[in-house]
Image (spheres, rainbow, N blue to C red):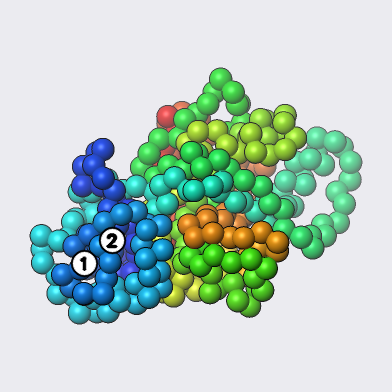
Amino acid sequence: SDLDEQDRQAYNFQLAKNAASRVGLMVNQKKLLDLSKSGKYHASLPALAGNMVHLIENGGEETVKVLKGLLDKGEFAESDLNDLSEVNLKSPIEVPRRNVICVGKNYLDHVAEVAAVHNAKSGEPAAPLELPKYAQFFTKAPQCVIATGEGVENHSNITKVLDYEVELAVIIGKPGRDIKKEDAHKHVFGYTVANDITARDVQKRHNQWFKGKSLDTTCPLGPCIVPASQLDASDLAIKMWINGEPRQNSRTSNMIFNVGAIIEQLSAGFTLQTGDVILTGTPEGVGFAMKPPQVLKKGDLMEAEIEHIGRLTNRVI
């Protein structure tokens, strides 16, 4: 797997349940360097005991470069390293400062499968698919965000059509407005994996998408952030398994609007802020478009994976 080769991933973790969160950097593939101890290795590093947004604000990419230099040296006290299997991972951005921003219908094959469902229900012949000129934006409430390993409520009293969506998530590092797509990379701190869990019937019932997209626990995010300086996210494998069965399998190069185009359109007249989370859309293979349709049920295991970032695993409870 590509997932264990990365000595450049930043994690948010706890040493014990209910303990204060810390930021750790992967070293030696299976150990986390506790960045609250990083000052002893490099005098210019701030005390990074706080959360990931604190790290991004206190140096951002410059801090990443220094940390990468530390990794290349590889001389750390064992007492400052924590085994990945022994810590409690938190979402990289635990509670975003404002709504998670999402892009709808951003992979052509997903647009096609959604259209096929609607055409089958209406009995109308399928119209030829046209590429949209503008991205479709909506949001999820901040408290939807959960970490890898945490349970997703089935909300069976509210929805009968709970569905999954694996997505590449962009974390904004540098604030900005009216950003041109060729400059967008300067504003991206890094990337993580998201699962935009959706109550399809609630989404449809309320017309606007916010309610059906914002039920508690419906935005798993993680397991880590890979800094943008360390990863070209333009052509990565993006996959989802349900109970071990492959459901979604595409590449980020199949996006209709790539990350630069999304940031250009979103930031027009609207200031992006440090720590903003942007979900970039899901590829084909969602449950409600299958024949027959598949819905998430209690006990289902969702595994969302993006090449070179990691695997986000959550069970429906």
Are discs 2 and 1 less than 8 Å apart at CB? yes
Residue at coordinates 72% horizontally, 38% vertically from top-left? Answer: 208
Residue on which disc 2 sits: 48
Residue at coordinates 66% horizontally, 30% vertically from top-left? Answer: 202
Mark 2 or 1 closer to N-term? 1
Secondary structure state at the residue bearing disc 2: loop
Residue at coordinates 55% horizontally, 73% vertically from top-left? Answer: 185
- In the image, taking residue 158 as reference, residue 79 lies left or right, namely left
Q: Amino acid at mark 2?
A: Leu
> Is residue 157 at least partly visible in the picture?
yes
What percent of the width, then of the height, locates residue 130? 82, 60
Q: Amino acid at mark 1?
A: Ser
How many marks can you see?
Answer: 2
- With respect to residue 35, does 315 lie above or below? above
Residue at coordinates 37% horizontally, 58% vertically from top-left? Answer: 54
The disc at residue 38 is 1
What percent of the width, then of the height, locates residue 163? 58, 38
Q: CA distance from mark 2 to mark 1?
A: 7 Å
- In the image, taking residue 132 as reference, residue 278 lies left or right, namely left
